[in-house]
Image (cartoon, grey):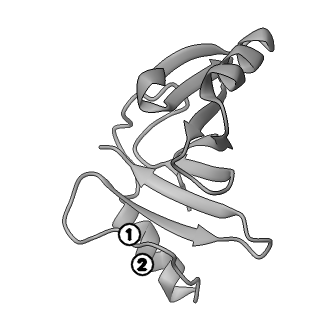
């Protein structure tokens, strides 16, 4: 099962302070809008998202259809197909992708309570 590009989505209290901290660790901004309380930061192939007021917990995030550089892949498994495969294995869902094609997302929770977001943008 190929879930796509991986990043860690951090639920932060103060996005400016968090951005400054991670920038000191060598991360650079590659997306998002600090005025909208979200940023994407990169350090080599490592990607983190900072989200203020959007998530209750830190989350693992996968993006079907993207590589680690957020470039569209020619071939990938659609989020709805991934969802069907997981449902067939008895995985419960917190949120589900709708029908159709294109962008969609779902959320499952691992046994330790960590949200896993699968968010397809293409």
Give the residue displayed 64% in from the left and 71% down from the top. 109
Q: Are marks 2 and 1 in contact (CB under 8 Å)?
A: yes
Residue 32, position as x, y percentages in the image: 44, 25
Helix, strand or loop at label 2? It is: helix
Q: Dot 2: few (<14), some (14–19), or many (≥20) neighbours within 10 Å?
A: few
Describe residue 78's horizontal placement relative to residue 38 as left or right: left
For residue 30, which numbered disc appears in the image?
none
Figure quadrant of residue 110: bottom right
Describe residue 84's horizontal placement relative to residue 57 as left or right: left
Give the residue displayed 50% in from the left and 34% down from the top. 67
The residue that label 2 is drawn on is 84
Q: Residue 7 versus residue 36: which sits nearer the camera?
A: 36
Label 2, label 1: how many angstroms apart (C-alpha)? 5 Å
Residue 90, position as x, y percentages in the image: 58, 89
> Can residue 25 be seen in this snapshot?
yes
Establish if 111 lies above or below 101.
Answer: below
Give the residue at the far left of this rendering: 100
Helix, strand or loop at label 1? It is: helix
Describe residue 100's horizontal placement relative to residue 96 as left or right: left
Instruction: Assign the N terminus to one quadrant of the image.
Output: bottom right
> Can residue 33 be seen in this snapshot?
no
Q: Dot 1: few (<14), some (14–19), or many (≥20) neighbours within 10 Å?
A: few
Q: Residue 119 versus residue 10: which sits nearer the camera?
A: 10
Figure quadrant of residue 10: top right
Establish if 11 lies above or below 45.
Answer: below
The residue that label 1 is drawn on is 81
Instruction: Assign the C terminus to one quadrant of the image.
Output: top left
Give the residue displayed 40% in from the left and 73% down from the top. 96
Give the residue displayed 74% in from the left and 70% down from the top. 113
């Amino acid at each position: 099962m190929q879930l796509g590009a991986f990043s860690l989505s951090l639920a932060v209290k103060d996005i400016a302070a968090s951005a400054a901290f991670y920038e000191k660790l060598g991360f650079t901004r590659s997306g998002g809008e600090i005025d909208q309380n979200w940023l994407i930061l990169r350090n080599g192939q490592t990607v983190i998202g900072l989200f203020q007021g959007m998530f209750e917990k830190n989350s693992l995030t996968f993006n079907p259809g993207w590589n680690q550089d957020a470039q569209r892949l020619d071939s990938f498994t659609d989020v709805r197909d991934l969802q069907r495969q997981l449902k067939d294995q008895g995985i419960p869902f917190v949120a589900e992708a709708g029908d159709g094609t294109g962008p969609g997302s779902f959320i499952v929770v691992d046994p330790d309570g960590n949200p896993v977001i699968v968010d397809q943008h293409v």
